[in-house]
Amino acid sequence: MIMENKRFTKNDSGFICKNCGKEVLPLGYTSRNHCPFCLCSLHVDVNPGDRANSCGGLLRPIKAEPDAKRGYVIIHRCERCGATVRNKAAHEAKIQPDDTSLIIKLTAGINN
């Protein structure tokens, strides 16, 4: 019998952003994995939502890429271990959508 690894765990908890200190509310439909205000995240997942990564470093957005199926994908780099992580943007969310102006700047290669 082959066990299937679950690649996604819904974990739609709110949190206080470790970078900007703002309160981030749950999305309501999928896992919220980054701050909609500054787009930073924490390196806490191995697979989305599992919170199984012990690194815990701050993931800073380094660029964004348009994706025909997913809208925008934000690429983060961990300040602690240097890993690169891709996260779907939530720019169309009804609750605290991602800051579209920051996503556009990242798409254009502007990192601040």
Image (spheres, rainbow, N blue to C red):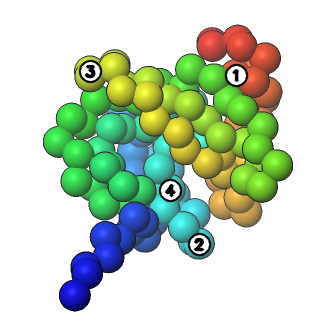
Q: CA distance from mark 2 to mark 4?
A: 9 Å
Which residue sits at x=36%, y=38%? Answer: 42
Crowdedness near tag 3: few (<14), some (14–19) or many (≥20) residues, C-alpha within 10 Å = few
Give me the disc on residue 106. Answer: 1
User: Could you tell me residue 66's position as x and y percent?
Assistant: 78, 37
Look at mark 4 in the image and give the residue it sits on. 32
Look at mark 3 in the image and give the residue it sits on.
80
Q: Quadrant of the N terminus?
A: bottom left
Can you tell which mark lies on residue 29?
2
**Residue at the far front in the pictured view:** 1
Residue 83's spot in the image, x, y percent? 36, 27
- Mark with earlier residue (3, 4): 4
Task: Identify which amino acid the numbered label 4 is placed on.
Answer: Arg
CA separation, marks 2 and 1? Answer: 25 Å
Q: Tell which of 13 and 23 is nearer to you.
A: 13
**Are discs 1 and 3 less than 8 Å apart at CB?**
no
Q: Amino acid at mark 2?
A: Tyr
Q: How many marks?
A: 4
